[in-house]
Amino acid sequence: MKVAVIGGGPAGAMAAMTLAKAGVETYLIEKDLNGDKPCGGGIPCGALRAFDIPDYLFERKVSKVGIIAPSGDEVVADLGDGYVGMVDRARFDPYLRERAVQAGARLIERVFTGFSKKESTPPRPLFIKEEEIKVIFKQGEKEDSIGVDAVIAADGVNSTVAKQVGAERPQVYLTVQEKVQLTGEAKKLYEDRCEFWYGADISPNFYGWVFPKKEFATIGTGTYLDDGKNLKGYLGRFKERLGARISDAKVLKRQSYVLPMGPIKKKVYGNILLVGDAAGTVMPVSGEGIYYSIMSGNLAAEAVIKGDFASYEREWKRVYGSQFRLMSLLRQWLYRDDKWRERLVRIHEDKDVQERTLALWLDKERKYPIYSIYWKILRSLLRHG
């Protein structure tokens, strides 16, 4: 069997590594091996058991989470024995690709441009399991191709593969972040702490964040795509609210990117499987994407190895379906207005609520059933009303 993985981010790299380890002839096609994708870069400690990520890749290990309400009231959650590992995607993605190469995958730096099907009489649909397809890619003016039995599409939220197969597209947010160089008290404050800031002035449907790295921190916010014209203003007001925390911070770089929010329903099109941002596997409310991207890549690869492509969708729904559905419902409650955002912060003064919501984020093996977490949060929100 031959498989092409389009896109060399976390989802694609994990898919390629899983395939190659199983002895599948694997081609990992990435358009830019020196890319630096804008991303908060937080990976909860519970994910480490699945990823086996070495400590040296973590820029910081965050043990405290600050949650700041529109009014400025603040709750600080201590993660205890847990932590959130902060990675820089410019170092993290190449590491994952190298693991795939070491497993036997062939890494190709080219731009995917499309598919063509093998000639048959009578003509047959392109995207069917039994039909070998030709993956076309190019560098500059030079075009090349590979005939493969399956494709795993990990080429991001603006997936070319998804467009080719006519896949539905997820709801998307436009986000902006700045890499800032912290000094003095600000550098000390964010040494082991990240923050989530809430307020309609920062974002009417998301949050502002501060995620520390080794040499810098990322600060950013996001909003619906059709509200993107106001994004610069949201970031400016966020920086005003941060005030003295970043007053002396030097802006190193500003980046904008599109973030999918919630998975698409159909991820399998015959012998083509969509994973990661191409499949919208970003958790509503938290915006967490790296963990779910990697797991989607792994599940898709396992389905290809078994020769049962459709099992990828079934397994995704079994493991993550209820969690994504319930978080989508919570998002509708929490981002109604600033009164609800105030409640969101206040309920985290309750240690039981704090423990359960942190378990949802940090403990991927689910110490608490997802429904118990959802109802605990919802009851607390209503009680604080």
Image (cartoon, rainbow, N blue to C red):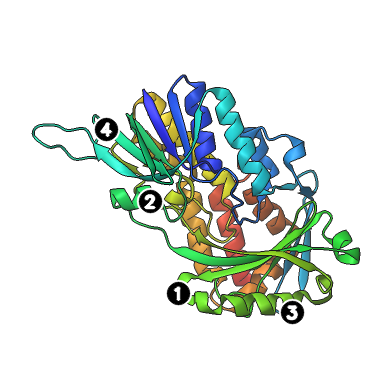
Q: Nearer the viewer, residue 345 or 149?
A: 149
Element type at marker 3?
A: helix
Mark toward the start of the polypeptide (3 vs 1):
1
Taking the view exactly as shown, the residue that stands out farthest to the top is: 23
Element type at marker 1?
A: helix
Mark toward the start of the polypeptide (1 vs 2):
2
How would you rate the neighbour count of disc 1 (Cα within 10 Å): few for under 14, some for 14-19, many for 20 or more?
few
How would you rate the neighbour count of disc 3 (Cα within 10 Å): few for under 14, some for 14-19, many for 20 or more?
some
From the image, state whether disc 2 or disc 4 is nearer to you: 2
Q: Residue at x 49, y 45 (%)?
A: 31
Q: Which residue is mark 2?
A: 160
Q: Quadrant of the C terminus?
A: bottom right
From the image, state whether disc 3 or disc 2 is nearer to you: 2
Distance from Cα at disc 2 to Cα at disc 4 = 20 Å
Q: Position of residue 80 (x, y in %)?
A: 80, 48
Amino acid marked by disc 4 = Lys
Q: Quadrant of the N terminus?
A: top left
Mark toward the start of the polypeptide (2 vs 4):
4
Report the disc number at residue 240.
3
Q: Which residue is mark 1?
A: 226
Amino acid marked by disc 2 = Thr
Q: Are marks 4 and 3 in contact (CB under 8 Å)?
A: no
Distance from Cα at disc 4 to Cα at disc 3 = 54 Å
Q: Which residue is mark 4?
A: 129
Distance from Cα at disc 3 to Cα at disc 1 = 24 Å
Q: Is residue 127 visible?
A: no
Amino acid marked by disc 1 = Asp
Label total for image: 4
